[in-house]
Image (tube, helix red, strand yellow):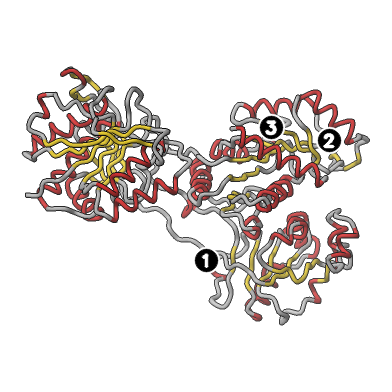
Amino acid sequence: MYRPTIVVVDSGIDSTNPLFQSAHISGIGLKKSAKSPSGFSISGDFQDQLGHGTGVCSLIAKKLTEYGIPINFYIVKIFDDKFEADENSLLHALTYICDEIDCDILNLSLGTTICTKLSQLREVCEKLYQKGAAIVSAFDNSGAMSYPASFPHVIGVDICEECGRDEIYFVEDSPVNILTKNRIQRCEWLNNKRMLIEGSSFNTAIVTALIAKLLYENGRLGFHEVQKALKKVTLPYNEGIEGSKQRKKPFAAPKKAVVFPFNKEIHALRRYEESLDFTIVGYYDTRYSGKVGKPCDVLINQGPDRSVHRGGTIVQDISELDWGADFDTVILGHLDQIIKLTRIDYHQEILSLCQKFHKNIFSFDDAYGPEDTDDRINIYTPMITPADVPHYTFGKLYRIGKPVIGVFGTSAKQGKFTLQMALRRQFLQEGYKVGQLGTEPHSELFGCEHVFPMGYQNGIHIDQDDVIPVINSLIHDIEMRDPDLIIVGGQSSTIPFYYGNVRYMSDFQQQLLYATVPDCVLLVVNIFDDIPYIKRTIHYLNSISTVIAIAVSPITSVSTLGNVNFQKALSFADQTEEFEKEFGLPVYRISEENDRVGLFRLCEEYFSVE
């Protein structure tokens, strides 16, 4: 029989308790030390002063005794007077174990829900896995995702009220591997006292003992062998339940692209063309649009000087496009309005030409289905499908440990994406590593890691209940890439201006806020917005995050009944001064370069103070 070594990282152990008389116990105590180069000192003192570690060890020991297995503990004490999983202490303890201890099973009846060093913590867990250690870790009792329990190659243990008293369930394809009943257990404590306790920390001890039994009977097992053995002695939680895994082809990054039509959603491509990793060789529209022959930069209010400087690019007629020219991708903006205007089905017409000339399609509209698949070309549409929904997470959300900047507004068509791109460019220029979750369909073209296209003609094809988990999983994936900060931005209004029609309700905005919980928010407002409405929006955002500045949109027209637009006679200077006095926040203009730099500096200072 194999005698496994169980390493317990906790508050230590009261080795004087009679329960441990026959046990083989060794270990260390880990303390923070300013004098040590590593920031920590190591001693031979692993005496428990809290009781938690003793309680965990007693539950493991009782089960091992029941199974007839010799008790072999190695204790790593990282707590003294408070039971708090400091990420630095945990990281240092795991690194020490990886380097110095021959570990069969690592019991972590602890964890953290927010971690600023995720990549380092995951890396050391991967190293322990490669050395053959079975890491067993408890999930947060409040229901959030926690680390390292949610990592791959870590057996995460959670509690579930649906489980029977002594039932243990194995969960497939989930960060949660084991489910157990949240039941009250009797354990040993300090000074030979006994305590009634409950929670995932103590249920983790039971799972650790079960794994020790499997090793005792079968010899040392690797992680996957441990999983297979666990599945045989536990109940299947999700047997027979299948989730959607089918996805469309991945995004094929263009090298040279043409763009059609030149509408609002395309303006950002022209405005921040230098930020693209590919070349746009032409902008096109239909002759009926009134834009053909006009300079692109004039149409986006960038001014004629820039247009001349960049070669005087003008909008060209799509009917005159040379399809045999040197480009590989057609970027299609939203086409519904232009199809209504011309009565030409451009989706199918362009698809036919792309198939003929072997050009790829990046389409804002979800207009192409399986019947349009063609091995000669790649058709890509940013969308969210059931394949993106994380399965068996039991409502758990990731709490993001990286700084998150949110850009939200009081209406649509304010330049929120323009502001996000300006911030992104400035942060990159200053040497920061930027992560970004875009909500515009062309976000991926600018290098955003993920897109949740929730704006006009959105490509969201999941149930409302799945929206928050999906967005949260996307931003967590960005966090795992170890950026210095993450930028997210909303669409339309943050809260309704009017409650008389559902079209004013902005469900996606609320869900984006709840899923990302930005550390700070830049609120984009219109110069003509009502003060009480802005105030309501600020109060709402402050209940979730912190509004640190107001950014004034360059748009000065306002819609009236009947969809008539007119220029409201307001002075930017007078209005921004009024906003500053009314809200006590700094006010910046999106249209001014110096103000955009000022917003960047404000964000930088905010997080440096934090």
Q: In front: 330, or 36?
A: 36
How far across and how far down the image is residue 439, in percent?
A: 63, 49
Q: Is residue 162 visible?
A: no
Q: Residue at x 22, y 39 (%)?
A: 207
Does 267 sit left or right of 420 as displayed?
right
Amino acid type indicated by mark 1: Lys
Label 3 CA crowd tier, 10 Å (few <14, some 14–19, many 20+): many
Q: Residue at x 83, y 70 (%)?
A: 316
Element carrying mark 2: loop
Mark pair 2, 1: CA separation? 43 Å
Quadrant of the frame with the C terminus: top right
Q: Earlier in the sequence, mark 2 or mark 1?
A: 1
x, y (%) of residue 348? Answer: 67, 70
Q: Earlier in the sequence, mark 3 or mark 2?
A: 2
Q: Residues within 10 Å of mark 2 (few under 14, many from 20)?
A: many
Q: Which mark is residue 249?
A: 1
Task: Name the residue carrying label 2.
Answer: 527
Q: Are marks 2 and 1 in contact (CB under 8 Å)?
A: no
Query: Which residue occupies the foreground of this view, 328 or 380?
Result: 328
Point out the residue furthest to the right here: 569
- Please name whichever residue, 283 or 609, is drawn nearer the observer in this view of the structure: 609
Tell me the residue that label 3 is attached to: 548
